[in-house]
Amino acid sequence: MKRAVGFLVLFAAVVLGAATLVSLGVNPPQVGIRPLGRYYLENSYFGEPSPKSPEAVTAIVWDYRGLDTIYEVTVFFLAIMGGLAIFRLEKAEKKKSERPAELTLVVKLATKILAVLIIAVSASIALHGHLTPGGGFQGGTALAIAPLLILVAYSRYVLEEKGLTYIKAIIARSLSLVLILSVVLAPALYGYYLLQNQPFYPAEVSGQLVSGSLWFFNLFDYIAIGMGFTAIFLYLSIPEEVYKEELEAVKE
Amino acid sequence: MIEAFVWNMALLAIIAALGISIYGIVKKPNLVKKLIALTIFTDTVNLLVILIGYRVIYPVIPPVLPQITPSTLDYFVKHAVDPLPQAFVLTAVVISMAVNCLIAFAIIQVYRLYGTADARRMVEKAFPEERL
């Protein structure tokens, strides 16, 4: 009751405050665009020099402000590393002999179809990131949903029998981060600037617009983010008894 | 008129949500509830940044070239929203997701160690000789 009254008061304050601001004419809605945003819109494809990407957001993320994004990938790397360090296991898990209980056929079949669809959609989001809204980050987070669904509908043991263990996920993630770094460093070896896109990387490959390094960044970032979150989900699905044993061993 | 009202209401609602989420972070003793309040906080800040780049015009289009021909550029610049805040939010979303994962891992491990996610009882269990 008290909480409902509080929310009603807050809602009334928001509506009345908005009405007061409108009647005073203090804060008119924004119709224009800032000069910096205008520059990015004009130059993301037709400017000279330009990143040759019709998608202005991807052009900013991986070209104009590419260094920001590289450091951001570093923060992502450290955060995932920290999480995995908290959850690490000292010794390998013992193999379980009995199979866990299974869900119904409907759930399992629907998960199979959905997982394939999710992987296809996430790849299209990531690889068209320089043409349409989307990119490596969004595609990677969508990709991580597929193993999560399989984890819930089947079990971790099925995923590991198919070959996706957390060690492999971490290796795939680290490899694609190294590839991102090599895409950053490659122009510097040939006398260009670090992270330089356009004169060094080709804008078009056999008639298809790839926007230079943007396509490579999106691809490697897609794998890095997807595999990073997959590793997190795999660690989260380790049974609690395993950690209980570990903690008991630490206490003694 | 109605546009100005909705614009101001969105701004005030964002400020109210910021206040509520800060209250949740400070006041709620349960660590999981603190984490939920933190995610609300980051999402609200992202919404605020998106609002800063928005334009109240019709039609308003996303910052993606509709056709790759120089003649559409004029229409595009007149109607597209600011791409820079969207780029900031894109990086902020991924970072906040990774950091939330790290915090969730820490909370789970703390719960396994102390058997509680309540910040006050956790302190009592970790430092039994100190009285709060």
Image: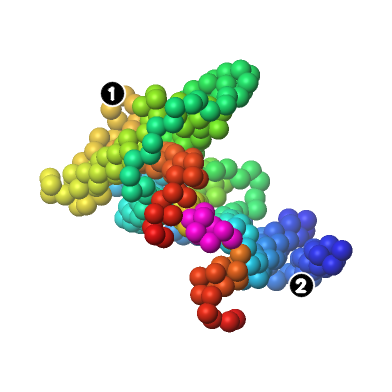
Highlighted range, magenta: B108-116
Residue at the spot 44% in from the left edge and 44% down from the top edge: A242
Specify the amino acid type for callout 1. Answer: Ser
Which percent across, then down, holds residue A16?
81, 67
Q: Marks 2 and 1: in contact by CB < 8 Å?
A: no
Toward the viewer: B19 or A27?
A: B19
Magenta: predominant secondary structure element? helix
Viewer-proximal residue among A245 and A231: A245
| Residue toward you, A225 or B104 | B104
Residue, disc 2: A24
Three-letter code, disc 2 = Leu
Where is A117 relative to A91, above or below? above
- Across and down, in percent, residue A173 comes to 33, 41
For image coordinates 63% across by 21% down, the residue present is A104
| Residue under disc 1 on the same chain as residue under disc 2 | yes
Relative image position of residue A126 (x, y in whole percent): 42, 35
Left or right, A137 with reference to A102: left
Res B59 seen here: yes
Residue furthest out toward the front: A252
Q: Mark 1: few, some, or many residues within 10 Å (few <14, many ≥20)?
A: few
